[in-house]
Each structure stands twice: as C-alpha cells, then as structure tokens.
Image (cartoon, coloured by chain):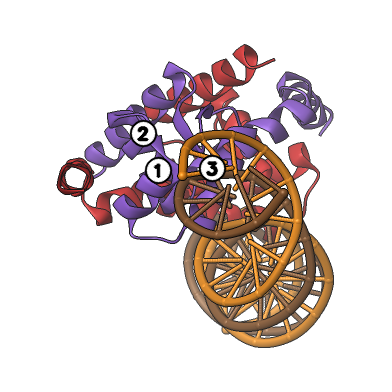
Chain colours: A red, B purple, C orange, D brown
Amino acid sequence: MKQEKKKINQLQKQLPPEEELYDLAEVFKVFGDSTRIKILYALYQSELCVADIGEVLEMNQSAISHQLRILKDAKLVKSRRAGKTIFYSLDDDHVAKILAIGTEHLEERK
Amino acid sequence: MKQEKKKINQLQKQLPPEEELYDLAEVFKVFGDSTRIKILYALYQSELCVADIGEVLEMNQSAISHQLRILKDAKLVKSRRAGKTIFYSLDDDHVAKILAIGTEHLEERK
DNA sequence: TGAACATATGAACAATTGCTGATATGTTCA
DNA sequence: TGAACATATCAGCAATTGTTCATATGTTCA
C-alpha cells in the first residue's frame, strides 16, 4: 500500500506541468482536422492566397479563412499581405516534421 | 486565367489521397486531448494498469478506460493481461517522437 | 471618394466529443 | 460455484467544433 502510493506520487511528479500538457494537446488538436491537414499539405507545396486554397480544397472562402485563423494562432502558418491579397505559408519546419512522423506512424501500422 | 487553373490543378494532384489525409487527421485528433496526452506521458515512464493511471491523473476508472480504448484503436498503446489486471504501455516509438516534436514546437514559439 | 475585390469575423446550427453513473464482462480464489 | 475485484461498455448530457450565410474590414484604382 505504502509502496503503491509512493509509486503513484513519483509518477505524478514526473509528469510535465499541467499547463504544458494542455498546450501540447492544443497543438495536436489543430492538426486533428482534415481540412487543416489539407491546407498544411497545400502550403507545403507552395505559398498560397486564401482564394487559391479554397479552390484547391473546393471549399468556400469563409471556411478556409476560419481554419487559417486557427492555424495562425497556433503559429503553424504565417501570412504576408500583397495588396488586396494575403499569402499564407508554413511557419516553421516543425510542421513538415510533424506531418512526416504522423505519416510514418500510419505506414507502420498498416 | 488558364495558368491559374493549371496551378490549382497541379496542387490538387500533388495532395496525398483524401483517405490518407483523413487518417492522418484522425491520428492527431487522438493526441489532441490533454487527458490522453497525460496518459501517454505516464506510460512513457512506465507500464501501468488502468487503476494506477486513474490515480495518477486523479480521474475515475471509466473515463480512463474510455480513453485507453481510443488510444488502443489508434495503435498508440498496447495492453497485456495479468490475471484481473490489464497493463498498458506505449505501442511504438513514434508516440514518444511525436510528443517530443510537439514539445519542441511549443518551446520555440515561446 | 466610391465601386470592386480579397479576406476576416460573427451568429447560428448540426455533429462530435469527453465525462459520469450504472451495469456488463472477465478473472481469481476460497 | 459465488463473492470480490479489475476493466469495459452503454446511455445520456454538456461542451466544443466545423461549416454556412451574412456582413464587416481593408485595399486598390479609376
């Protein structure tokens, strides 16, 4: 009993802080939607404006805009304005890495 | 215009197949919940039974069981029975890798 | 300035999700 | 076998999420 409690306590202490785990889950949540995954893959090929992404995914402008906002808040994409148009691109190379490992996992479990 | 259409078409073709992208999103969705992230981190330290996980996370048995089912379906954890008890552990090393890269991403965007 | 265009945002709705409490399944051992 | 224990599953609820439609914001150029 005593030993058991001790073990539980040890494990609890070894967990990263609550807030960090929460943030980590938040990042993955952003990857956890196929529309956003598609956007990320499209941007992996090339910088694109909102309208183009919409055409590639065959979805309306508003839906894309909403998802881009979420991706941007998560720092997965960045944007630059060129006149009326806003171009989006991947923010850092972690994005590609995460996609790659996810794919690897899928491959292996086949 | 013609060029534009062509570019869109190219991008569409370069995207991985719909189903693959969907599956990829499904995997990340599993990582996208803090309860499951906690379970994965706990299991990263040591193989654990359902009751112990419940104590570490301070959550009831039913909730843990449900999440373990989801993790198992996604092949992120595996289980072995020892009498009445069922021990869970991480299924493959991708899990740890994915957690690590996620954390890296969080670090850098601070 | 104001019309045209590109994008962002807000409200609303349907669908999905995580948790709870109750109960079912499976295992041990007296 | 049956009581005790460990885990799994089910139904139901509250909360969250993705999309749509309507509208707002921001930019260009005549």
C-alpha distance separating marks 2 and 3: 11 Å
- SS category of the residue bearing label 3: helix
**For this rendering, which residue is in front, B93 or A70?**
B93
Callout 3 amino acid: Leu
**For this rendering, which residue is in front, B44 or A30?**
B44
Residues under numbered marks 2 and 3 in contact, where contact means CB atoms less than 8 Å apart? no
Mark 1 belongs to chain: B
Q: Position of residue A18 (x, y in %)?
A: 26, 55
Q: Position of residue A102 (x, y in %)?
A: 54, 25
Q: Position of residue B110 (x, y in %)?
A: 21, 46
Query: Crowdedness of circle 3 by 10 Å Cα count: few (<14), some, many (20+)?
Result: many
In this figure, which residue is indicated by the disc labeled 2?
B43
Query: Crowdedness of circle 1 by 10 Å Cα count: few (<14), some, many (20+)?
Result: many
Q: Tell me what residue is drawn at x 64 percent, y 34 percent.
A: B73
Mark 3 belongs to chain: B
Q: Which mark is residue B39?
A: 1
Relative horizontal placement of residue B77, taking residue C15 as reference (left or right): left
C-alpha distance separating marks 3 and 1: 8 Å
Q: Is residue B54 above or below residue C1?
A: above
Relative horizontal placement of residue B108, taking residue B14 as reference (left or right): left
Same chain, labels 3 and 1: yes
Residues under numbered marks 3 and 1 in contact, where contact means CB atoms less than 8 Å apart? yes
